[in-house]
Image (spheres, grey):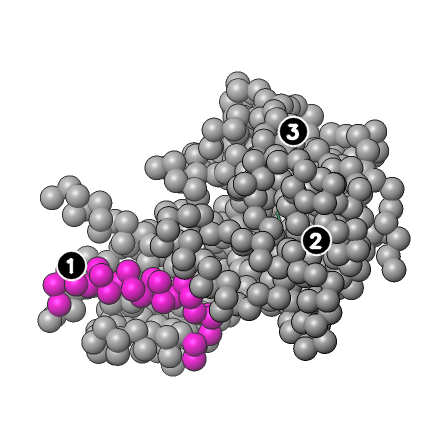
């Protein structure tokens, strides 16, 4: 049995964490929350912890964890404890802690704040459908909450699979009907229990849900301040109920504003590149990204100018010195690429000529990148200087084909754009290797009755800007998923804009 350590208290040494889930490319939102946690810890002599929340096996992407490590380190957000660095509260990967969660779910079963639910997925699905049809919010009706000890024993003896659910009060001696917690930026927030579901804590496969694992770990890792995105506010009452059910003191909660697209919708890959890998591979400097993220939400004094006197330009160290958390505005900050580009330009100009040359040499013409491109070109040229003729698109940012290049002979521009949108969705959902890409694109072509030739011709035009290029799929693999997707997105955006102008 794991010992439950003493509860977190407000005087305790500051410990904060980020807890990304390895479900794909590392997200700019993770960097933003990482930055805030880093600053908070460094300002207070505390510890910054990286925990990997990998218990959702259906969304798990094996390469993702390493990408998270690499991109956070690239940004300079170094953690004090984590899966790779170790530390006194490990393991820091939730999939290695499943026994701890099961033991904790048992504690709640025993003290009556959780119960076994034997409802089958089909039964739950039926209930959900009925509720949706009646325009009610989907909610577990508590069917298994009142099973007698005999019924539970009979179900268990029959080997029926079960989940463990949180018994949201009122129940037993706890008749409270709402939960209030303090958000350090917003003040008190109250949720009526009528709006809080009896959350599944442990799934029938024995894996915990986010809620149980998150609370147990934050407690056992002695986290004093949970600084995370505002999308988790609606989960917080469940967490507070869990702390109470265990008899633990909850940490302080800080919910940070969500980054937004220019149109104020929640930042999404449809409208903005959100992968940190994209920014790294597209020639952004980590200092510029950190500075840009530090401008989100307004924790820095509005007219703050760093060492070279440029307003809004500052370093990570300056943020640690001057950032004020309680000044953060909760209205969603806009992730404005124009501003990020301006900042990046500022940082590029500050490099010494030699450092600038080295940045170009490593970021644009890196050895590995050139080696892969060279391999695609060896059989295709007769003099070495022809190398540039077919490979320019690998080194440019702005590649836009003209309609005579992208619209296949028998298609209209409108049909072609619809198909390009389908290609984008297909590429987003595909593993970035030759066979997977080929199979997915061919399947799409068959479904939409686009010949292989038209299908690949269109994509070639979008990615390379031309009708002639080294082999398309190989080129896209070298070019990378993040940048390839961005190119398709920008192409679609540009066509939309030019259609609006007409
Ligand atoms: N695993 C959650 C995420 O992916 C963590 C949220 C939290 O910080 O509690 O963002």
Which of the pair 145/368 is nearer the observer?
145
Say which quadrant the N terminus sits in: bottom right
Residue 294 is situated, as x and y percent measured from the top left of the image, at: 56, 33
Label ID, residue 182? 3
Where residue 174 sits in the image (x, y, percent)? Answer: 71, 39
The answer to whether residue 263 is left or right of residue 141 is left
In the figure, 62 relative to 189: above or below?
Answer: below
Q: Position of residue 184 (x, y in %)?
A: 64, 27
Residue where numbered disc 2 is placed: 114
Q: Is residue 435 left or right of residue 112?
A: left
The residue under the point 25% across, 49% down is 494
| Segment colored magenta | 411-436
The foreground one among 430 and 112 is 112
The quadrant the C terminus occupies is top left
Q: Quadrant of residue 380?
A: bottom left
Sequence order check, earlier mark of 2 and 1: 2
Front tag of 1 and 3: 3
Q: Secondary structure at mark 1?
A: helix
Asked if the magenta segment contains residue 423, the reply would be yes
Mark seen at residue 414: 1
Per the image, label 3 sits on a secondary structure element best described as strand
């Amino acid at each position: 049995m794991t010992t439950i350590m003493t509860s977190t208290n407000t005087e305790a040494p500051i410990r904060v964490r980020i807890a990304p889930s390895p479900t794909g490319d590392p997200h700019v939102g993770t960097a933003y929350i990482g930055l805030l946690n880093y600053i908070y810890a460094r300002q207070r002599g505390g510890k910054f912890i990286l925990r990997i929340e990998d218990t959702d096996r259906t969304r798990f992407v094996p390469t993702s964890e390493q990408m998270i490590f690499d991109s956070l380190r690239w940004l300079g957000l170094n953690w004090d404890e984590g899966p790779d660095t170790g530390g006194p509260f490990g393991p820091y990967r939730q999939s290695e802690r499943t026994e701890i969660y099961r033991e904790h779910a048992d504690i709640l079963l025993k003290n009556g704040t959780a119960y076994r639910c034997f409802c089958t997925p089909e039964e739950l699905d039926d209930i959900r459908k009925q509720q949706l049809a009646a325009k009610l919010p989907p909610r577990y009706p508590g069917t298994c909450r009142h099973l007698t000890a005999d019924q539970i024993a009979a179900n268990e003896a029959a080997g029926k699979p079960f989940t463990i659910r949180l018994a949201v009060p009122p129940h037993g001696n706890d008749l409270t009907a709402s939960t209030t917690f303090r958000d350090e930026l917003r003040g008190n927030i109250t949720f009526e229990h009528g709006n809080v579901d009896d959350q599944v804590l442990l799934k029938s496969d024995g894996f915990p849900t986010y809620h149980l694992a998150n609370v147990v770990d934050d407690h056992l890792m002695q986290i004093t301040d949970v600084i995370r995105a505002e999308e988790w506010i609606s989960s917080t009452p469940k967490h507070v109920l869990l702390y109470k059910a265990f008899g633990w003191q909850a940490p302080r909660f800080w919910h940070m504003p969500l980054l937004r697209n220019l149109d104020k919708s929640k930042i999404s890959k449809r409208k903005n590149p959100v992968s940190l890998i994209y920014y790294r591979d597209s020639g952004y400097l980590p200092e510029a990204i950190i500075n840009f993220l530090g401008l989100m939400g307004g924790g820095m004094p509005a007219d703050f100018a760093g060492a070279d006197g440029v307003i809004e330009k500052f370093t990570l160290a300056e943020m640690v010195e001057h950032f004020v958390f309680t000044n953060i505005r909760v209205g969603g900050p806009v992730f404005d690429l124009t501003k990020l580009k301006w900042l990046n330009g500022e940082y590029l100009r500050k490099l010494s000529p030699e450092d600038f040359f080295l940045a170009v040499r490593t970021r644009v013409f890196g050895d590995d990148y050139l080696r892969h491109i060279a391999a695609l070109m060896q059989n295709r040229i007769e003099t070495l200087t022809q190398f540039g003729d077919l490979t320019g698109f690998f080194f440019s940012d702005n590649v836009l084909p003209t309609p005579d290049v992208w619209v296949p002979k028998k298609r209209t521009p409108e049909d072609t754009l619809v198909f390009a949108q389908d290609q984008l969705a297909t590429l987003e959902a595909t593993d970035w290797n030759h066979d997977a890409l080929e199979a997915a694109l061919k399947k799409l072509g068959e479904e939409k009755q686009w010949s292989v030739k038209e299908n690949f011709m269109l994509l070639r035009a979008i990615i390379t800007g031309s009708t002639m290029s080294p082999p398309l799929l190989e080129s896209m693999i070298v070019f990378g998923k993040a940048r390839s997707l961005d190119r398709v997105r920008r192409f679609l955006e540009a066509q939309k804009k030019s259609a609006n102008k007409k």
